[in-house]
Image (cartoon, grey):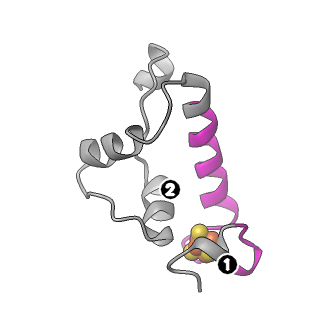
Amino acid sequence: MLIYAFEKPVFVVDAYARRIFYRLGYDMPAAYDAFRLQVESQLPNDVQMYNEFHALLDEHAKSICRKKPLCSKCPLIDVCAQRY
Ligand code: SF4
């Protein structure tokens, strides 16, 4: 991936990122590049921040916002459109 190979700030649109953005209620495009560009338009040009953001999204999706989410333990519950 570009973010790792060339130290370019590129947002990685993986299944975890899609799950969290959609559940939070963001109106995100389905197409990979359109989704990526929409996120990138809101982020500073900082590779380290992209890496950290990606890692945090993955960790949140694995530990809390799972396929069957643990909303009662989620720090985002007050801003989430699809809390269960
Ligand atoms: S409140 Fe639930 S659905 Fe919303 S982000 Fe948190 S875990 Fe996911």
Q: Which of marks 2 and 1 is nearer the N terminus?
A: 2
- Residue 28, compared with residue 72, is above or below; it is above
Q: Is residue 37 at least partly visible in the picture? A: yes
Q: What residue type is labelled 2?
A: Tyr
Identified at 48% across, 25% down, the residue is: 45
Q: Which residue lies furthest to the top in this view?
A: 6
Answer whether labels 2 and 1 touch (C-beta < 8 Å). Answer: no
Residue neighbourhood size for the residue with mark 1, other residues' Cα within 10 Å, grouped as few (<14), some (14–19), many (≥20): some
Mark 1 close to ligand 1, CB under 8 Å: yes
Identified at 56% across, 74% down, the residue is: 80
The magenta region covers: 51-75
Nearer to us in this view, 44 or 33: 44
Mark 2 close to ligand 1, CB under 8 Å: no
- Quadrant housing residue 30: bottom left
Check residue 35 for magenta coloring: no
Q: Main secondary structure of the magenta part?
A: helix
Name the image quarter holding the C terminus. bottom right
Q: What residue type is labelled 1?
A: Cys
Where is mark 2, residue-wise? 16
Where is mark 1, residue-wise? 71
